[in-house]
Image (cartoon, helix red, strand yellow):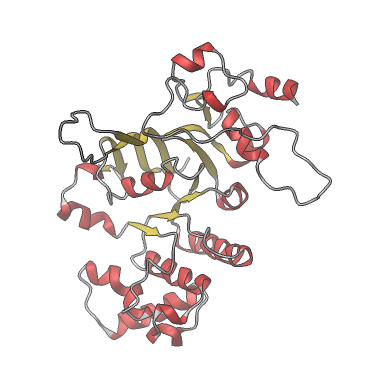
């Protein structure tokens, strides 16, 4: 069994909103992340999926300590990075990198490609040497761009090429974990496939782990070993990829799969798609957060929050009726 690289335990992030009324004591709080726990092993890709606003990108930034957590722990390689000071974080920063969603906004337009790629190494104290410049050229070749492009600026590239530059920057320090925050969602479908295949090749070559954040289940399924499904700040199901798609045990997971487009026009999903709107994280529903939209909700769902519990080999779900849900879903078809 692979060694656990990162262990996230009861991670919480609440944002207190500012108000123009100075007499309001209890300011509104956005519960962006509300007790998230998971692990990522060495060489593994964990997919994190959910609707927009569920808190998945916030989770990615929290485990990199780019945002301060309200509570919880993130243990990386045996050390709790949330308790580290700036000097301690600098020592592990090279092992934790991120690929941002927007390749246009995440690249400094005033820097050349070579400067962008080598910036993480300069931040770690590396000197500008001919060897380092040669390394930048090598990284460009690794991500599928000619080395002669290293003196160009980001505006001279397409979206897919810019994202390749962002990937080269992320892998430059040879990290152990890369957070991919919607890394392909801004790209055309044909370019998405090329970038996903590139990321898989780099993972195999460099032995990295990925936390792959996305909302497209088809893309996440293609790259992930395990998938965690997130809803309104909580993880509702975690399983190995094939097991999740063959036996989803949470009604929200089933609804997400029913929303996947079907290529053939005569084929239709048997499961009902999720109805209603995502509740506000300012005032999440009591009990199970999904119960206002769940076709199988009962009284206990409205009053008691279900815990993420073991439902089989590496399969966890937070539903009071997870054991009976496949039968209920079949009866409802």
Q: Image quadrant of residue 33? A: top left
Q: Residue at x 61, y 33 (%)?
A: 275
Query: x%, y% of residue 116?
Result: 34, 74
User: In the image shown, does 7 or 186 lie closer to the viewer?
Assistant: 186
User: In the image shown, does 254 or 30 lie closer to the viewer?
Assistant: 30
- Single out the residue that lies furthest toward the right: 266
User: In the image shown, does 179 or 79 lie closer to the viewer?
Assistant: 179
Q: Is residue 5 above or below residue 316?
A: below
Query: x%, y% of residue 140?
Result: 45, 77
Q: Image quadrant of residue 296? A: top right
| In this picture, residue 88 sits left or right of residue 306 | left
Q: Residue at x 31, y 74 (%)?
A: 118
Q: How many marks?
A: 0
Query: x%, y% of residue 1?
Result: 48, 40
Q: Residue at x 24, y 33 (%)?
A: 27
Q: Is residue 311 above or below residue 97?
A: above
Q: Is residue 205 above or below residue 24?
A: below
């Amino acid at each position: 069994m692979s060694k656990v690289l990162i262990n996230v335990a009861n991670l919480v992030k609440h944002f207190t909103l500012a108000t123009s009324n100075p007499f309001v004591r209890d300011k509104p709080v956005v519960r962006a992340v509300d007790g998230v726990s998971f692990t990522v092993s060495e060489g593994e890709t964990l997919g994190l999926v959910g609707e927009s606003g569920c808190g998945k990108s916030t989770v990615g930034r929290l485990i990199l300590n780019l945002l301060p957590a309200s509570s919880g722990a993130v243990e990386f390689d045996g050390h709790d990075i949330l308790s580290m000071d700036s000097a301690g974080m600098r020592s592990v920063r090279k092992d934790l990198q991120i690929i941002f969603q927007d390749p246009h906004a995440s690249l400094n337009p005033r820097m050349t490609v070579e400067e962008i790629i080598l910036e993480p190494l300069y931040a770690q104290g590396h000197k500008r040497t001919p060897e380092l410049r040669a390394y930048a050229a090598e990284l460009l070749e690794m991500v599928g761009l000619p080395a002669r492009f290293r003196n160009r600026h980001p505006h001279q590239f397409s979206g897919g090429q810019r994202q390749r530059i962002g990937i080269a920057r992320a892998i430059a320090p040879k990290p152990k974990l890369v957070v991919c925050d919607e890394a392909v969602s801004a790209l055309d479908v044909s370019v998405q496939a090329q970038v996903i295949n590139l990321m898989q090749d780099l993972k195999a070559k460099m032995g990295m782990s990925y936390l792959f954040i996305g909302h497209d289940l088809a893309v996440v399924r293609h790259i992930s070993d395990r998938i965690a499904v997130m809803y309104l700040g909580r993880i509702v199901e975690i399983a190995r990829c094939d097991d999740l798609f063959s036996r989803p045990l949470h009604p929200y997971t089933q609804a997400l799969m029913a929303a996947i487009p079907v290529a053939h026009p005569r084929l239709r999903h048997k499961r009902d798609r999720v109805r209603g709107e995502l509740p506000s994280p300012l005032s999440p529903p009591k009990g199970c957060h999904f119960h206002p939209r769940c076709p199988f909700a009962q009284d206990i769902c409205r009053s008691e929050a279900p815990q993420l519990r073991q439902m089989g080999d590496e399969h966890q779900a937070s539903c009071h009726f997870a054991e009976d849900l496949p039968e209920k879903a079949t009866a409802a078809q």
